[in-house]
Image (spheres, rainbow, N blue to C red):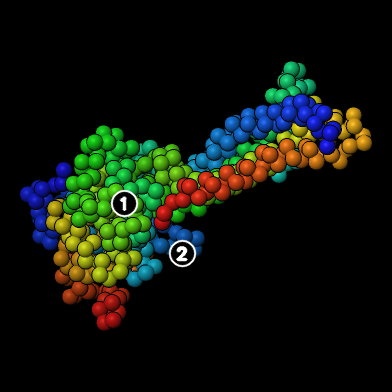
Amino acid sequence: MNVIFDNIDTFLRGFGGTLTLLGLTTLFALPFGLLLAAMRVSPVASLRATSTVYVEVLRNTPLLLVFTFFSVIITYISGALPFQVAAVLALTIYTAPFFAEAIRSGINGVPVGQAEAARSIGMTFGQTLGLVILPQAVRSVVPPLINVIIALTKNTSVAGAFFIFELFNVGREVANANGNAVVAVFLGVAFFYLIITVPLGQLADHIERRVAVRR
Amino acid sequence: MEPSHTAHPAPGTAAAGREPLVVVKNVNKHYGDLHVLKNISTTINRGEVVVVIGPSGSGKSTFCRALNRLETIDDGTILIDGKELPKEGRGLAKLRADVGMVFQSFNLFAHKTILENVTLGPIKVRKQSPADAKKRAMDLLQRVGVANQANKSPAQLSGGQQQRVAIARALAMDPKVILLDEPTSALDPEMINEVLDVMVQLAHDGMTMVVVTHEMGFARKAADRVLFMADGEILEDSTPAEFFDNPKSERAKDFLSKILTH
């Protein structure tokens, strides 16, 4: 265990790196996912098609491939994309479809009569979605959204392979320097991931209970 | 805001509105191979109360829902107050604001209070001030007899109360015409009359109404015309007295004998 306490500064910096990736990606991917979900249920066929193709392609592509595309190919083309930016970009583009699908399932869970009633009093598509459907979808959307964030937390580790200073990379470095304590080092890494993911799961339960809609 | 008695003679009189408000011309609709609306044409005049009746699967609900384009149509035209229904977008939303709709399953907004259900449209669509919208909503809730429930959520009300709120929600938009799609079919028997009473009142106030219903009493009391639909066609278009006492088509006779003898 000493190997962790001896390198606690490095661990904490890596933890910070992971949190930053997680925070920034969620910040960008959640609105992007909402937009994709809205396009998917919109009355405009071309928007529906665009969203469907995007979601299906990205969510069925390995994350490592998306990362490689942004870190290697984009850098090769444009020259100067910092790895940190490329990582957030790759994670955002990859994660947004999962957010979109979670939100869409919630939208589909709201009885169709609610949207019909909203449209029948003259609400536009945006008003129907924003004022009637989404507020009722929140309850069923929160748990799957948090599942996506938990998956994202773990996916940030892929960034470690692309010279980003985050938890998984820290684990590799410290393990390389302390070949006799590899098991302890990786248990330490796992512990830091759990510090993020376990409370997220509990937050999901809490929010689900708080925003229950009566029917 | 409601049209007065003098402007619109009581329904049942031959003089009830001669000015066309809803004009339906050669409307067709298919669900796959099923031809649900077959070349439907009819005109509903301002102030007129039209009851649409017919066996299930006759297309009467589809017809009603097509009037504000909750159902798309394959061909034909539907004009509301001289304007053709736009396909999608803001134009359609604007037109729908003028066409009230009351559903079989009420469809009150489950996350809003009763009062908010009635004020949401006026505030967000008509851009009324919240204070004005609230005042008008309370008047309407008073009129349909549920003002004392204003701050409850829909789930706390009985079906009959919910449906009366749904009528108030539609009226709050000051619509030119109200469509009621089997408004009493989902109600327990003891609650049907409280909703019908509101509808009869509305008819006597001169509101233009299209009502899909099996309530003979309402049709006789309040309707100017009865449209009998079967297999996607309008088979009869007559006054309530004529239709119930003297149906012409075999299909209508058969239908009436079934609903009158049980």
Q: What residue is rendered at 37% in x and 63% in y? A: B59
In the orientation shown, which residue stands out farthest toward the top? Answer: A80
Mark 1 burial class by Cα count in 10 Å: few <14, some 14-19, many 20+: some
Choose the circle earlier in sequence order: 1 or 2.
2
Residue closest to the far left: B6
Check residue B152 in the rendering and tell me which mark sits there, or answer none: 1
Q: Residues within 10 Å of mark 2 (few under 14, many from 20)?
A: few
x and y percentages locating residue B138 in the rendered image? 21, 46
Between A165 and B244, the one nearer to me in the picture: A165
Q: In terms of image quadrants, where is residue B130?
A: top left
Image quadrant occupied by the N terminus of chain A: top right
Report the amino acid beneath label 1: Lys
Q: Residue furthest right?
A: A180
**What SS does tag 1 mark?**
loop
Identify the element where label 2 is drawn. Answer: strand
Chain containing the residue with disc 1 = B
- The residue shown at (74%, 17%) is A80
Compare residues B229 and A163 and report the one nearer the observer. Answer: A163
Residue contact at pointers 1 and 2, CB within 8 angstroms: no
Q: Quadrant of the C terminus of chain A?
A: bottom left
Q: Position of residue B241 (x, y in %)?
A: 15, 70
Residue corresponding to mark 2: B34
Can you tell which mark lies on residue A135? none
Amino acid carrying label 2: it is Leu
